[in-house]
Amino acid sequence: MASHISYHFTLFKKFQVIDHVPTLTVHGSAAPPGGFNLNNPNAPFVACDAGTPLTLGDFTPANNPLWAVLNSRAQGNAGFSPVSIPGGAQAGSSWPTMPPANTQGWTEFQLNPSTNKIVDVFGQWITNDHQLKDIPAGVIAQQPAPFPPGLEAGIKPFVCSMAGDKGTRPGVPSNYWATSLIFLVDPATGNIVTPANLAATAEYYLVAVIGNRGQTDGGRYLNQPDALQAAASVMVWNTIDSPGVQLPSLSNVDLNDTNGIFEQYFLRAGAYDVVGFRLNVQTVFNGVIAALNNALVSNPNLLGGVAPDVWVKQQPAHLCSKVVVRVQGDNFPTFGTTPDQDARIAQKNLAPFDPTISATDPNPNINWKNFIVGQPLFFLIKGAGKNTLKILIDDALQGTFKLHLAIPAQTYERLVKGADRQMKGFTLVDAKEFAASHGRAALPFPETVILSQQGADNVLEFGPLTEGHFAAMSLGIEYVPAKVKDGLKGDITIVQESMAARLDPGSGCYKVERAVVGGFTLQVRAVDPHIDPKGNRIEFGDN
């Protein structure tokens, strides 16, 4: 299933903060202008005083008044200046340019970004996703009624582990993994679903109910300096903790963004709301297999000799989800923490993987750097034109990183294969076996030869390059995440030497000698992906 932009989590929640809903001054007030109340996620789909903000079934952005008034403001028009709808069912109707001023939300989501501006993303949802309405109405209906703020000072977010949860602990049921207000939702409808198993082609939203039991309203859009944040992870059925995968946040405006931090823009004291994350089954399965393979490095007998993909699919190996919340600056609770100890975490058992699913990318932890080698001008003198590629590796990288050199198969046959070509520190690996063990996506070229590092000194002779004077290659850096810590690791340097013909001024004759003709250095740095938008490290789980 193709991923779609989420109306509710990506767009609607940003519309709320663009138009002052947190402060109840404009489109969230008791009597909002024009009868358009953005406390209600259905508001753009139903009529207000001027008409219907979204022209349902019309996938031209300009024919949808809500997009048109925001786009008018994006084009620099003054607030409240009239916008005439050019076509569709509401052609000729007049609407006011909105927002009337550069609000905090408008500045953050439209003016500041260089790409993925909110008006552009809104237009993509209209055109590409055909106004897909994914309001999680069933989960919203599970929200308990607001309650008077508790006696605790400050902002106290929690994830609901049961119906009516007010965030006090202890007091949750002993089977909290079955009672938590965490649900799988169909992205096409917003409905709660309970699949018998998780098919490889499926994608769901993981939606959870959160609340605030403190006396203080939370969120940056209620004038708090620190963001209110949530994150979610899924892991193989477990008791407390196991290798898992962090899910991308549905608040991301870019469908390719894997950032797992969901920002809750506002949450009043004693109130509830829902947070959402994207669960692509195939991606999650690949990640779980990779996480188990990484765990096997330090504990080879972890699964009793059973292959990770077999172990995961054995019943009752359900996928387990955990959702955590925090005020930015605080640590998230670890995934080894139980919900009866800490209200900021909740757990829910989901469905098992479909027995037919298989990993398409079981070990994606290879980064390839494509490069081109060239040929200096050489004369047809015996010995001239032969090239040598040397790969120099810092000692700090030895044992933690493994290198692979990939060469297109035809290039290898033409330039490398032969008894007179030295190959030191590399061993030839069957490409089909490499793809089977690392995943087809691990191959940088469709038809390739893989040379894998076996020693510290890595030398490869090739050439001369007589056809086009260029050849493509790729350097692969393989790593095991469990062994790599965040930070600068060291350098890998590629040096190309060539047997070049040099003129001897004394004799007036050419002689062949070795010379360095080019190269480059790669600086290897490990970057922890679990960093929040302000650069703070997220400390939770094994991820």
Image (cartoon, helix red, strand yellow):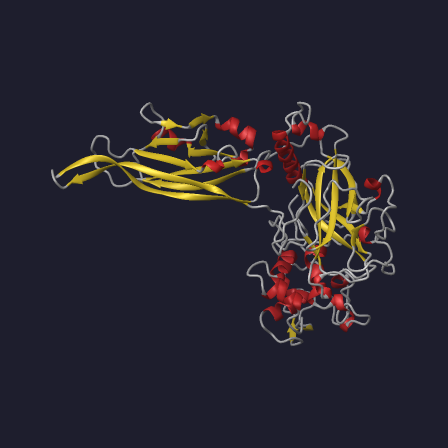
Q: Is residue 489 left or right of residue 465?
A: right
Query: Splitting the image into 4 quarters, where does residue 247 fall?
Result: top right
x and y percentages locating residue 527 in the rendered image = 56, 46
Which quarter of the rendering shows the C terminus?
Answer: top right
- Placement of the N terminus among the 4 image quadrants: top right
Q: How many marks?
A: 0
Q: Residue furthest left?
A: 507
Residue 156, above or below 342:
below
Give percent across and percent down for residue 21.
75, 66
Q: Is residue 356 at all visible to an observer of this figure?
A: yes
**168 and 396: which is toward the camera:** 396
Residue beneath the point at 14% across and 41% down: 505
Residue sitting nearer the eye, 292 or 151: 151
Q: Is residue 444 visible?
A: no
Left or right: 508 with respect to 375? left
**Relative side of 375 to 311, left or right:** left
Residue 157: x and y, percent? 78, 54
| Spot occupied by residue 67 in the image (x, y as percentages of width and height) | 65, 65
